[in-house]
Image (spheres, grey):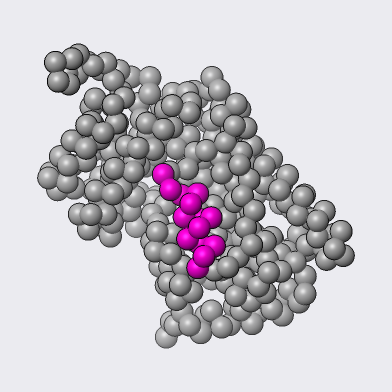
Amino acid sequence: DWDSGSIIDEQVQRIREQVGTDRVICGLSGGVDSAVAAALVHKAVGDQLVCIFVDHGLLRQDEREQVEQDYVASTGVRLVTVDAREQFLTALAGVTDPETKRKIIGREFIRSFEQAERDLVAEAAADGEPIRWLVQGTLYPDVVESGGGTGTANIKSHHNVGGLPDDLQFQLIEPLRALFKDEVRAIGRELGLPEVIVGRQPFPGPGLGIRIIGEVTEDRLDTLRRADAIARAELTAAGLDGDIWQCPVVLLADVRSVGVQGDGRTYGHPIVLRPVSSEDAMTADWTRLPYDVLAKISNRITNEVEEVNRVVLDVTSKPPGTIEWE
Ligand code: XMP
């Protein structure tokens, strides 16, 4: 019989035995897996653990605060935030090709993570306490997937915090390796993590960077972030979070259409809503959201986000569409 309490006890015991008095590093993405993995390790070894969070500027509204404030308050972990927003914007300037964007974001992510890692390793070495361990939030499906070619999963070059380069300097701690997502969520709740993190739907490592179709700029990120926050708030308010797998909100930044607002003609951008239902993201269907919820989201976005004058719904299953637009 599955019991999150006893899994926590077992893992804590195991991590303590493995790590001893060594120091440990963990990258946080803002997502469920790394948050729960780090919380388990923190429960086991306390301040021997330091977490690194890279703010690449492609996060959604409030995500950085949720990690820096809510997560830290509920766990007490030591956190280092790397503010890499300028670095990513500069690297992405002028780039529109989806795969090029993904590669740049992945490369810059590793670069900023490794810089923070080197600083911590140097600091620890100066204290005579080498860092020997790296925590990763690998789940059972990740283990299975990387063992066998699973077709559509590899169409895009994926990037996430679990996808850091093989760092021979460290040994890995992967406390979630035998678990599925719902089990990880249960453990996170048992550990008292914030619901905004534990209940979070999948969000890609490259973040909003692959939800702006066209060049990524600060203004466009701001537009998309506001539209996304409205869509998420309304889906939550309507009690629909449990019915959808995720709902990418996409800004067609290179498309404009004519609209009318008040007495004026507008020439703004469309926002796409992409609500999907899925078991594992390998296949998906578009979610039949209630019309009144769609209407509310559309009204609010076009009223509150002035750059947007049209909201459209993506009614494509996967295949042939992927969940993300890039
Ligand atoms: P697609 O667009 O391929 O997405 O149908 C399938 C699932 O994967 C997520 N996704 C990513 N997750 N790093 C991630 O951690 C990535 O680079 C990435 N790209 C897509 C996507 O949100 C969906 O859940």
Determine if the magenta segment contains residue 69. Answer: yes
Residue 121, image quadrant: bottom right
Q: Quadrant of the C terminus?
A: top left
Whether residue 295 is situated above or below residue 186 in the rendered picture: above
Instruction: Give the residue drawn at x 50%, y 58%.
Output: 69
88 to the left or right of 213: right
Report the number of discs. Answer: 0
Location of residue 128 in the rendering, given as x and y in whole percent from the top left corner: 87, 65
* Observer able to see residue 19: yes
In magenta, the rendered stretch is 61-74
Q: Position of residue 170 (x, y in %)?
A: 76, 59
Please say if 66 is above or below 217.
below
Q: Quick check: is 282 in the magenta stretch?
A: no
Side of 100 relative to 285 (left or right): right
Q: Does any portion of residue 183 appear in the rendered image? A: no
Dominant SS in magenta: helix
Q: Nearer the viewer, residue 120 or 161?
A: 120
